[in-house]
Amino acid sequence: MRLTTKGRFAVTAMVDLAMRQTRGPVTLAAISERQHISLSYLEQLFGKLRRAKLVSSVRGPGGGYNLAQPTQGISVADIVTAVDEPLDATQCGGKENCHDDKRCMTHDLWATLNEKMQEYLSSVSLADLVAHQAGKPVAVIKHFRSAEQTPANKAPDASPEKVAA
């Protein structure tokens, strides 16, 4: 189970688009250059995002893409689902036939993980990701290191005075 390049690139491209669309439609060529994602790959992804009504296209000179909905209304789960990215930790795709056509002993564990991933990705909006890029604290996006630094496992104080002593 992992989020593949398709899902990661789709989310990255949507954040890029959301950050720049106030100046008019954003071209895929510009996103491709900034994010180092193949233009042809972006064209495939944006075709799916357009069919899911997450983006709209503007043709002609000055054309490109805009978001079709407000950033608060688009979740990471919406984006990942739109590009057909399966997020499934079970080996059976939820069919419960993973061990000799029977349910495996850990099926409920992986099925619950699927629910938690979906719940989390649904709770993070495109607006949250844009705010995070702007350096604003966002409750649903926690910095890993700050969560890691609890009193029980806090790194020792390495100030020069204590090191020299």
Image: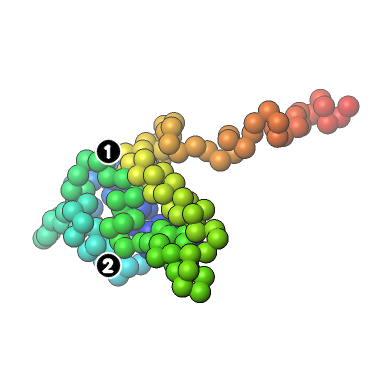
Q: Position of residue 74 (x, y in %)?
A: 27, 45
- Give the mark nearer the N terminus: 2 vs 1: 2
The mark found on residue 72 in the picture is: 1
Residue at 26% from the left image edge and 66% from the top image edge: 43
- Any part of residue 28 in sight: no
Q: Is residue 51 above or below residue 18?
A: below
Neighbor class of circle 1 (other Cα within 10 Å; few <14, some 14-19, many 20+) is few
Q: Which quadrant of the figure contains the C terminus?
A: top right
Q: Position of residue 21 (x, y in %)?
A: 23, 46
The mark found on residue 134 in the picture is: none
Residue at 38% from the left image edge and 59% from the top image edge: 7
Q: Amino acid at mark 1?
A: Gln
Q: Position of residue 107 (x, y in %)?
A: 50, 59
- Any part of residue 114 in sight: yes
Q: Residue furthest front?
A: 102
Which residue is denoted by mark 2 in the rendering? 44
Q: Amino acid at mark 2?
A: Gln
Kindly indicate the quadrant of the structure image that contains residue 35: bottom left
Kindly indicate the quadrant of the structure image that contains residue 49: bottom left
Dot 2: element = helix
Q: Measure the alpha-carbon separation of dots 2 and 1.
A: 24 Å
Of badges 2 and 1, nearer the viewer stands 1
Q: Is residue 106 above or below residue 158?
A: below
Applied colour scheme: rainbow
Pick the residue in front: 88 or 24.
88
